[in-house]
Image (cartoon, rainbow, N blue to C red):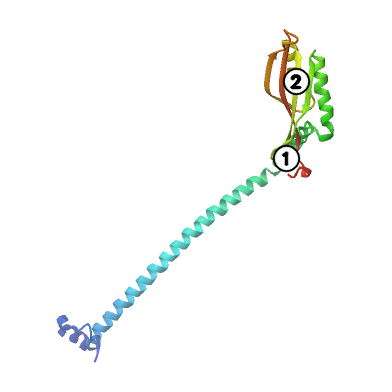
Amino acid sequence: MNVAEHIKALNEFDLADLDMENIGSWPVALKVILLGLLFTLIVIAGFYFHIDDLNQRLVVVEKEEQRLRKDFEQKAFEAANLDAYKDQLVEMEARFGALVAQLPSETEVPGLLEDITDKGELNGLSIKRIDLLDEQAQTFYVELPIAIEAVGSYHDLGAFISGMAGLPRIVTLHDFDITIDTDAAPMLEMSILAKTYRYRGDDDGA
């Protein structure tokens, strides 16, 4: 049967006679058309899913590209400023060393107590008590509390407190309590807690 006969048979075929359960009985031309449609649908569906998969991969790659670009820009910035960072590090180390130098070591604490006593007597105070209390360990340093009791005039006490700032070591003052000395009025009795600090090293369990 030639092509003309297939077309004639297709024209004479009534679509109402199509049996979907017996496709083998369909005219050859109709089978060819059906196969062509199925093939076209399969190609279109495969192309669509392939393109969709490529688009998803493209989105992932673009995100990765943005992340790598940011990493590159950050590293390029750091590399360009490496010398400045090194200079800052040297400066920070110098400042840290200067601060640590202002913190007394355990062997210097007795000398610090003598300095505080001398500072009080120099300002006309009578030092009644100066005791080193138990250490208080913090994360990076150790607090060394010092309980001080002194008697003197209002101006002498003020001069003593101001003079503490001139000590070569860092000392902070806390818990002021000033009352009139009943035994030596109008002198004042001051109770104060001074704190100095030392760097917490490996020996302190840091």
Question: Could you tell me which residue is drawn at 82 percent across and 23 percent down?
Answer: 115
Could you say which disc has been placed on residue 149 in the image?
A: 2
Q: Please report the residue visible at 67 percent of the width from the left and 47 percent of the height from the top.
A: 79
Most extreme residue toward the top is: 186
Give the vertical position of 103 relative to 75 (above or below).
above
Work out which quarter of the rendered image holds the N terminus and state it: bottom left
Quarter of the view holding residue 124: top right
Q: Position of residue 74 (x, y in %)?
A: 61, 47
Task: Mark 2 vs mark 1: give the one in front.
Answer: 2
Mark 2 is on which residue type? Glu
Q: Is residue 126 left or right of residue 45?
A: right
Q: In the rendering, at what x and y percent does residue 194 appear? A: 73, 26
Local crowd size for mark 2, using a 10 Å CA cut-off: few (<14), some (14–19), many (≥20): some
Q: Which mark is residue 89?
A: 1
Mark 2–mark 1 Cα distance, whole angstroms, equals 43 Å
Q: Is residue 117 above or below residue 45?
A: above
- Nearer to me, 142 or 127: 127
Please state which of residues 33 and 88 is positioned toward the viewer in this rendering: 88
Q: Residue at 55% across / 53% down in the picture?
A: 67
